[in-house]
């Protein structure tokens, strides 16, 4: 359960200060799948950074499972990220010198999981995303879609309850993009909370709710009843 | 994150940039090797000086004529001709605690044997010289009282002269020409193992009477060597000799001594402290290069932090804490300096050995200097690694992630 109350974020560069977020309140229940949409400069990246505990709000309250995050130190935020949130980025952000397996092991290494457990879980996760036969490939030996699968496996490594995906299909062709969205759909059914940040309508359609952001505020929230229609149509 | 794994990751990152890592290490390698080699040279010089003085005997007092005053300008030691053989005899008879006295005169001369020739020092002295100066005969015998009384034309040849003349024991009984004057060789001296301009092996010993009449043409003595029974009595004997010589030379109460007494033990202490300073100086200069090597490490680590900003951002997003990033970069710079240090130790020791073999320059590699240089290199790695590592650990995750 993620709850934001009246979140404000102001960036000040010298004398000019920019209000990126102005009083955003939002609750994301467990097993929910939401999409945050908005034009560039709307504040959706800032919102994602705050939800992802990469940054703290200047005002308001942010709770993850009841824990107040807004006042944590950098190291405490790192701990929260490590345990609760898995990131999937637009440009994958895999470490180019590491193999797929090593990339997936990395969050567990940072969390202090021992080698045997780490490798076992990384192999399981890569098998789940369909890359069981690509364990020792380096990112440049994989297609964009495959790299994003590795990134998803990495996001799942420390068993987070929430996956935060920032334009996860932005660097992929539409076919690979749809495949990746299917993976998210599947993970959501398995019980994970999914937060998508996107500016593409068809991606947002996978979500139960679409949060439209404009000028640092929530413009409106769209409930999607037809969530699975898209999927079912495709299967026909 | 376990230490071992952090080290493995650091090494993987260093081997990913082999050429750069090697060049960065080179600075430390040269620094450590230079420190070890320079200290080895300094300590080698110290050992050489000490052993050549010990070859003379540390219980030795050497009296030489004082400095003449000429128009208010003090001339060099030995420029006066005030010491005589009688002074030597008086010291032997009247000063307590003396085990032997040997007056000596010396001059440089050209020596010919068969078709070989060499330049060397000719020492005119008495039989006691052998015991006073620790000069032992290798073949044949030393000069005798009779030969001194008779001004015999006999010579005892030093080992280096022997080599220079291309001769060995077979020279015994043969003639050599000293400044064209024929001498019969009656003995050769054992080597004292010292070399260089102060070699005590590059000399020929003849009776003092012969030297005065045939070579120097003067009654004055260059040095009176006094062996003291016990090293503890050196100062006391030195004072007695001063009193005796002042009386004999009829010096007024306020007049300066017209002779100088050198104490072998003091000279040794002085020279070792000089070579000690020399060692510190050489080591100090070499450490500067080690310091420069450290700055090289900092430079490369800063470049590395900038290059890997994105990587640091990703690690932070995946839950890396500050100290984990800090450790990783610290270990990288310590691995660079530590590995450089080990290679430097090997090269430094090998270099010292090669210098000794090739240049006949005595070197002494002390364990303490190796430990010092190596631990200094590690310290340099830590010191110059801290700033880049702190910089990396303090990067803001969002800004680091945005970095392209």
Image (cartoon, grey):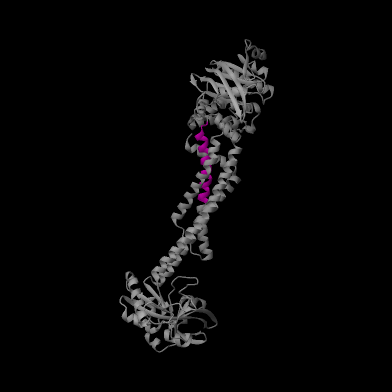
Residue B66 image offset from top left, x and y in percent: 43, 77
Residue A40 image offset from top left, x and y in percent: 67, 23
Give left or right: position of B176 versus B232.
Answer: right
The residues colored magenta run B320-343
Q: Residue furthest left?
A: B96
Is B9 in front, or is B84?
Answer: B84
Residue B205 image offset from top left, x and y in percent: 44, 81
Above or below — where is B35 with respect to A93?
below
Residue drawn 52% across the image and 55% down it:
B286
Is A35 in front, or is B398?
Answer: B398
Is B88 in front, or is A29?
Answer: B88
Secondary structure character of the magenta stretch overall: helix
Residue B298 part of the magenta segment: no
Q: Quadrant of residue B258?
A: bottom left
Above or below — where is A134 with respect to B149?
above
Residue B338 part of the magenta segment: yes
Residue B345 image offset from top left, x and y in percent: 50, 53
Is B136 in front, or is B296?
Answer: B296
Q: Dividing the image into 4 quarters, which one contains the C terminus of chain B? A: top right
Q: Quadrant of residue B59?
A: bottom left
Give left or right: position of B359 versus B404.
Answer: left
């Amino acid at each position: 359960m993620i709850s934001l109350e009246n979140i404000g974020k102001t960036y000040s560069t010298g004398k000019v200060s920019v209000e990126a977020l102005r009083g955003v309140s939002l609750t994301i229940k467990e097993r929910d799948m939401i999409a945050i949409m908005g034009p560039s400069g709307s504040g959706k990246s800032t919102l994602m950074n705050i939800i992802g505990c990469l940054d703290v709000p200047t005002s308001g309250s942010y709770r993850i499972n009841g824990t107040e995050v807004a006042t944590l130190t950098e190291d405490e935020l790192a701990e929260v990220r490590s345990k609760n949130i898995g990131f999937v980025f637009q440009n994958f952000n895999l470490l180019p010198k590491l193999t797929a397996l090593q990339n997936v092991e990395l969050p567990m290494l940072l969390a202090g999981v021992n080698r045997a457990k780490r490798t076992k879980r990384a192999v399981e996760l890569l098998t789940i995303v369909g890359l069981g036969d690509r364990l020792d490939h380096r990112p440049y030996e994989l297609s964009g879609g495959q790299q994003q699968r590795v990134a998803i496996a990495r996001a799942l490594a420390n068993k987070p309850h929430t996956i935060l995906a920032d334009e996860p299909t932005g660097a992929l062709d539409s076919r690979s993009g749809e495949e990746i969205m299917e993976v998210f759909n599947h993970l959501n059914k398995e019980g994970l909370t999914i937060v998508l940040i996107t500016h593409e309508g068809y991606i947002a359609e996978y979500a139960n709710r679409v949060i439209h952001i404009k000028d640092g505020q929530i413009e409106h929230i769209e409930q999607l009843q037809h969530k699975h229609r898209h999927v079912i149509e495709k299967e026909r | 994150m376990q230490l071992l794994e952090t080290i493995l990751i650091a090494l993987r990152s260093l081997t990913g940039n082999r050429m750069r890592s090697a060049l960065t290490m080179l600075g430390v390698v040269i620094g450590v090797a230079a420190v070890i080699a320079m200290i080895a040279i300094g300590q080698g010089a110290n050992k050489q000086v000490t052993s050549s003085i010990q070859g003379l005997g540390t219980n030795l007092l050497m009296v030489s004529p004082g400095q003449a005053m000429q128009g208010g300008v003090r001339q060099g030691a030995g420029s006066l001709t005030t010491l005589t053989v009688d002074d030597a005899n008086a010291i032997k008879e009247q000063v307590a605690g003396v085990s032997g006295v040997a007056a000596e005169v010396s001059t440089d001369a050209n020596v010919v044997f068969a078709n070989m020739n060499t330049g060397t020092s000719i020492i005119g002295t008495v039989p006691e010289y052998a015991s006073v100066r620790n000069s032992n005969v290798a073949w044949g015998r030393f000069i005798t009282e009779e030969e001194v009384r008779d001004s015999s034309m006999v010579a005892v040849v030093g080992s280096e002269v022997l080599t220079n003349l291309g001769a060995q024991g077979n020279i015994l009984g043969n003639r050599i020409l000293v400044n064209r004057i024929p001498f019969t060789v009656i003995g050769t001296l054992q080597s004292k193992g010292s070399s260089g301009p102060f070699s005590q092996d590059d000399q020929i010993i003849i009776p003092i009477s012969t030297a005065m009449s045939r070579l120097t043409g003067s009654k004055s003595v260059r040095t009176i060597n006094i062996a003291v029974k016990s090293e503890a009595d050196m100062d006391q004997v030195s004072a007695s000799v001063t009193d005796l010589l002042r009386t004999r030379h009829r010096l007024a109460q306020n007049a300066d001594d017209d002779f100088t007494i050198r104490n072998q033990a003091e000279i040794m202490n002085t020279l070792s402290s000089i070579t000690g300073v020399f060692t510190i100086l050489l080591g100090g200069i070499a450490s500067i290069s080690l310091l420069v090597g450290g700055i090289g490490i900092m430079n490369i680590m800063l470049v590395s932090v900038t290059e890997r900003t994105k990587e640091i951002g990703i690690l932070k997003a995946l839950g890396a804490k500050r100290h984990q990033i800090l450790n990783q970069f610290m270990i990288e710079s310590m691995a660079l300096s530590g590995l450089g240090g080990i290679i430097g130790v090997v090269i430094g020791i090998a270099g010292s050995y090669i210098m000794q073999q090739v240049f006949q320059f005595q070197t002494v590699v002390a364990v303490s200097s190796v430990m010092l240089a190596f631990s200094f290199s590690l310290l340099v790695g830590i010191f110059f690694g801290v700033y880049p590592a702190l910089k990396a650990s303090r990067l803001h995750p969002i800004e680091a992630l945005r970095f392209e």
